[in-house]
Image (cartoon, rainbow, N blue to C red):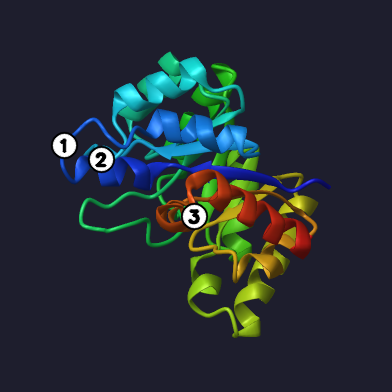
């Protein structure tokens, strides 16, 4: 199975919002990522709009040629935005105002009726649905029960402890379980050129969402070269 690389451009917007200026432009960055070989673009529209803005999402959906994945919290405001914009995919993620970045997977055991209703609304609008979750058997099973099309396995624990065989083992088992439950399997968070290989080698995973390291390396290498370097590392792992 070909392993797709989707680039999260949130931190381009983070840099722009540090000065509340009009550069760097996340839309221009997303287009460069496409041209460099990205298979899709991801952006997280947070409730507090700390980085990506509504106009960024509108603009990307107008100009991008590859699938766009909108990360968002499961709130009425965000559901209405998704129903209006109709991205290729929505990934429901946990969101806390005080966190620097997403700290873990969505707790799908809380308020299951709300999640089920949200997924049904998105599907009715023709939007593919994914849940950002930790690689925990009960969580993976519940994600399928809720009706999601896909899950994105949170790779943060592995990224922080790549030498602990339990962290990559949990991702392997979670991917196998999800595939057996007919869920598409994605993964992301904290992945870099140095640690992506073991995750890319998990055959059930069909898509990686990677952002911070792409933008970080782009400062030194340029964003196109950063995307190409990640593509080579992923292909070597696969």
> Where does the image place residue 152, in percent across and percent down from the top left?
58, 50
Residue drawn at (21%, 41%) of the image: 17
> Where does the image place residue 164, in percent across and percent down from the top left?
60, 85
Real-space Cα distance between discs 1 and 2? 6 Å
Name the residue carrying label 3: 221
Real-space Cα distance between discs 3 and 2? 19 Å
Q: Is tag 1's residue or tag 3's residue first in the polypeptide sequence?
A: 1
Camera-nearest label, 3 or 2 = 3
Name the residue carrying label 2: 16
Name the residue carrying label 1: 20
Answer left or right for 169 relative to 179: left
Residue 210 versus residue 155 in the image, above or below: above
Residue most toward the bottom? 164
Contact? badges 1 and 2 (CB < 8 Å):
yes
Which quarter of the figure has residue 55? top left
Give neighbour class at mark 3: few <14, some 14-19, many 20+ (Cα, 10 Å): some
Under circle 2, the secondary element is helix
Contact? badges 3 and 2 (CB < 8 Å):
no
């Amino acid at each position: 199975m070909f392993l797709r690389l989707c680039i999260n451009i949130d931190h381009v917007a983070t840099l722009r919002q540090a000065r509340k200026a009009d550069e760097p432009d996340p839309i221009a960055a997303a287009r460069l990522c496409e041209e460099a070989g990205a298979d899709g673009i991801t952006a997280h529209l947070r409730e507090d709009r700390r980085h990506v803005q509504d106009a960024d999402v509108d603009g990307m959906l107008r100009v991008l040629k590859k699938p766009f994945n909108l990360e968002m919290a499961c709130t009425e405001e965000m559901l209405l935005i998704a129903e209006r914009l109709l991205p290729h995919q929505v990934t429901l993620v946990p969101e806390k105002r005080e966190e620097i970045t997403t700290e873990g997977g969505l707790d799908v055991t809380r308020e299951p009726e709300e999640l089920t209703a949200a997924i049904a609304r998105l599907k009715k609008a023709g939007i593919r649905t994914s849940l950002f979750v930790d690689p925990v058997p009960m969580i993976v099973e519940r994600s399928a029960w809720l009706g999601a099309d896909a899950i994105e396995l949170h790779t943060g624990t592995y990224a922080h402890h790549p030498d602990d065989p339990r962290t990559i083992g949990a991702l392997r088992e979670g991917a196998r379980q999800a595939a057996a439950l007919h869920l598409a399997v994605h993964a992301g968070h904290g992945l870099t050129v140095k640690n992506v290989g073991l995750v890319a080698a998990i055959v059930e995973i069909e898509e990686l969402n990677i952002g911070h390291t792409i933008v970080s390396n782009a400062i030194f290498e340029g964003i196109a070269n950063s995307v190409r370097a990640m593509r080579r590392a992923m292909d070597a792992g696969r």
